[in-house]
Amino acid sequence: MHPTSNRFETNVAEALADEQLKKALARTAVGLPSARERAVAKLPEFEALRDDAVALKQHVLEHLDFYLERFEQKVIEQGGKVHWCATHEEARQTILKICRDADAKTVTKGKSMIGEEIAINDYLETHGIEPIETDLGEYIIQIRKEPPSHIVGPAIHLNKEQVAESFRKTHTDLPPDRPLDDPADMLKEARTLLRQRFLKADVGITGANFLVAETGTTAIVTNEGNGDLTQILPPVHIAISSIEKVVPTLEDADTILRVLARSITGQDLSVYTTFSTGPKRSDDPDGPDEFHVVLLDAGRSEMLGNEFKDMLRCIRCGACLCYCPVYTAIGGHAYGWVYSGPMGSVLTPALLGHEKAAHLPNASTFCGRCEDVCPVRIPIPKMLRHWRKREVEQGRTSAVSRIALESWAFIAKRPALYHTLANLKYSALGLIGRKKGRFASAPFTEGWTKHRDLPAPQGKTFQQLWSERGGRR
Amino acid sequence: MSGSREKILSTLRKSLGRGPLDTATVKELEKNLRRPKNRVVPARGQIKGEKRLALFSKMAEACDCTLARVGSLAEVPGAAKEFLRANNLPADLRIAPQPDLQALDWPKNATFGLAGDEHPVGLVKAWAGVAESGTLMTLSGPEHPTTLNFLPDTFIAVLEAKDLLGTYEEGWKKLRGRKQSGAFMPRTVNWITGPSRSADIELTLQLGVHGPRRVHIILVGEA
């Protein structure tokens, strides 16, 4: 897809005006965090597992060359192929070539964020090969020609009426008056249609939640079973992954698995965890004849050496999105590319270039919930600050915000002046707003008051209370 | 392509501020791959006997599996028939060609082999079960076609109590013991934790998206 991250402000205005979206986001902001909290409460070792996951990821990143080469060697030993791709374009061409060599007409796809990142569907389609997304959420957004709005729930921004409408528009061979009121009706329809596509596909493309260096294994985690039908039915299986997904051993995968699903859907484990090693063996009755792994870099090897290195620990659970007050107000599409929410605000500028997504790191209140819930404890707010610092250093900020910040800094560095001005301001606001308790508008606060009231100061300031209680400065 | 391989490796080494790893470090990392890990393993699964069996059953039921318990393998065909009848399901069984299963007395219409779209019920013997999360572990191979796990609407798994493990780590240990050489991995290791599901439409949980709608586990023998 063509990124629209650089028109973030317009995207946000549109998202905030979308009543359907507001309903869908309200569901997300409550449903998923409460599922996570229930799962975490049931596992006393959860925090210790997070620490282990951090240590594991750090170790892998420090020795990434070793583990990637080890992984490659094992894939080859098992009869598979590894394709190293430095750029999105190289990954697209590589996948197209594998499909053409297999004389492919249709390709089924399991859910893959790398697939979204390289926009493989559009590319295959342009070159005469039909890609079919098989994860229910991905299928819905594919027929609507939309990017995913959440890593784990790509169609989380939609309501069932919108899905029904898209089904009617796309599945034109079916009776137009069939009932589609219940999600169960839509599920049945999608299952029946996609089953035929699974059986006829020439190539299956899946992502990889991790790669195991010890055995040359790629692993996927799904709830639907679509990733499995994608890889066992067609004669060719392509697993696409970015380079930071490798772990040393099968036991290391256990550690990641124990924090992955719990962090987002609240499951102890997703329904299907599948470890694939090489093509089918000579005496296997089913499975693919060819096994390809496409390893994508696209900027990650450089991130390893800069202040965004910790972002490479990310296991794509999507928890930070559901807990983010910004994401849950604007949804995923406003971020303008495939990754959204706090992790997207760090990753998108790193992968696309700062100039194409400079607004995203500003879309944060720095409340820190993203870091609190991240299973691998990525210091997301710290990295958003790094981006903001770069923005200032490179003179990308607007004149208004620059002058405002400089004035604020001037005052903040002079405590006496700061307190005088602050007291003056709060007394005035308190006096005017005491009766109503809030302002519908006030000078310099349009950005805030356009969507909500500004609360009036109530009583004394913190500094005043502190002094009264004999607190020391 | 090999150009990209070298480019990626050299960029990431540059980012790490070093050249290729020295032989001693590589040897150490190699060795560590084979050393047991000193990692947190939840206490929940580290139990034995009837307690382990009870935990497995509880976890499997929590993720929408149904369970039955029989004394011996010989009772499995009867238990399968009973389950299908009670749920008003077709009685056409497609069974994994595993010797333990082939030795049993099945109804005449039961067949052995891989699954296609035309098979409503698949029946397999799980290679192991993991109590920690109520997970079934199966291995692909001539005796266990992977399609049986995914294509039929109803999936029946036979699990012998002696194959029940506590944690995932025990599963890998058992698998490593299967063959002497490094090639202990089959094409596919499947962990199955309940029937297929999705909450992609309005976060409404629904069972049976692409894989089986029902998972029935027949537990065999004493813990």
Image (cartoon, grey):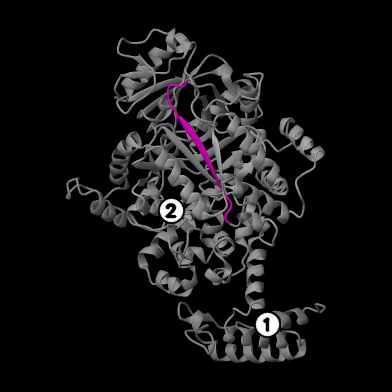
Label 1 vs 2, first from the N-terminus: 2
Judged from the image, the secondary structure of the residue bearing numbered disc 2 is loop
Q: Write the start and end of the magenta stretch as one range.
A: A284-298
Q: Is residue A152 visible?
A: no
Residue visible at 43% across and 32% down in the picture: A232
Front residue (pair A305, A89): A89
Q: Is residue A386 left or right of residue A332?
A: right
Badge 1 density bin: few <14, some 14–19, many ≥20, Cα 10 Å: few
Q: Any mark on residue A461, and which?
A: 1
To which chain does the residue with label 1 belong? A
Residue A239 vertical placement versus B57 (above, below): below
Residue visible at 70% across and 84% down in the picture: A409
Of labels 1 and 2, the one closer to you: 2
Mark 2, residue position: A154
Q: Position of residue B158 (x, y in %)?
A: 47, 19
Q: Position of residue A308 (x, y in %)?
A: 66, 60
Residue visible at 46% across and 56% down in the picture: A28
| Gap between marks 1 and 2 measured at Cα | 45 Å
To which chain does the residue with label 2 belong? A
Front residue (pair A297, A453): A297
**Which quarter of the figure has residue A17?**
bottom left
* Residue type, numbered disc 1: Thr
